[in-house]
Every structure is written in C-alpha cells, then in structure tokens.
Amino acid sequence: MTTSEPHTGTPRTVTCPMCGQQFTCGLSTSCWCVTREVPEEVRRNLAARFKTCVCSACLDRLVEEARKT
C-alpha cells in the first residue's frame, strides 16, 4: 500500500504503474506489502506519484535503491 493507513477489503488485480505487470493487491493489513520494510521517504514518494500500489518487484527495487543512498 502506498499509505500507512490500514485498509480492509477484497483483494483485486492491479496493474503496476511503474512496469505494467499485473499483481494482486490485498487491500488490507494482511497484504504481501506489509511484509516489506519500506522507508518513509519511499512511501511518501510513491503516494505522491501514484494513485495505486506498485508490484513487489518495483517496490523491492525502490527500497534497495533507497538503502544505497
């Protein structure tokens, strides 16, 4: 999720706005994305740029890039 607010809902298929890959967004606090440690700066950047979540590969890449800086 691009925000830190808890969500609940039915999982849905989403197209990643960064790479175009389809993935399942859990729309809840049990989604795969909550298992990732995402720096606050990455969360803010994603929320400012996109209206939906990004896929696990893109999220992992962004987190890795943030750790290198």
Image (cartoon, helix red, strand yellow):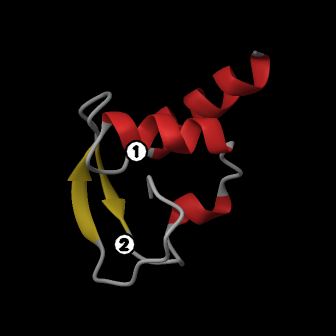
Question: Is 7 left or right of 34, judged from the image as shown?
Answer: left
Residue beneath the point at 23% across and 33% down: 20
Please name the amino acid that badge 1 sits on.
Ala
For label 2, the crowd category at 10 Å Cα-Cα, with few meaning under 14, some 14 to 19 and many 20 or more, is some
Which quadrant: the N terminus? Answer: bottom left
> Is 60 in front, or is 68?
68
Examine the image and state in which quarter residue 25 appears. Answer: bottom left
The residue where tag 2 is placed is: 27
Image-based side of 37 in relation to 28, left or right: right
Q: Which percent across, then down, holds residue 14?
A: 23, 54
The outermost residue toward the top is 69
Q: Residue at x 32, y 29 (%)?
A: 18
First along the sequence among labels 2 and 1 = 2
On screen, residue 8 versus residue 40, left or right, reads: left
Bin the neighbour count of mark 1 within 10 Å (Cα to Cα): few under 14, some 14-19, many 20 and up: some
Q: Is residue 46 left or right of residue 29?
A: left
Q: Residue at x 28, y 82 (%)?
A: 10
Camera-side residue of 16 and 2: 2
Q: Is residue 12 above or below residue 55?
A: below
Q: In the structure shown, which secondary structural element does the residue marked by tag 2 occupy? A: loop
Residue 25 is tagged as none
Mark 1, residue position: 47
| Front position among marks 2 and 1 | 1
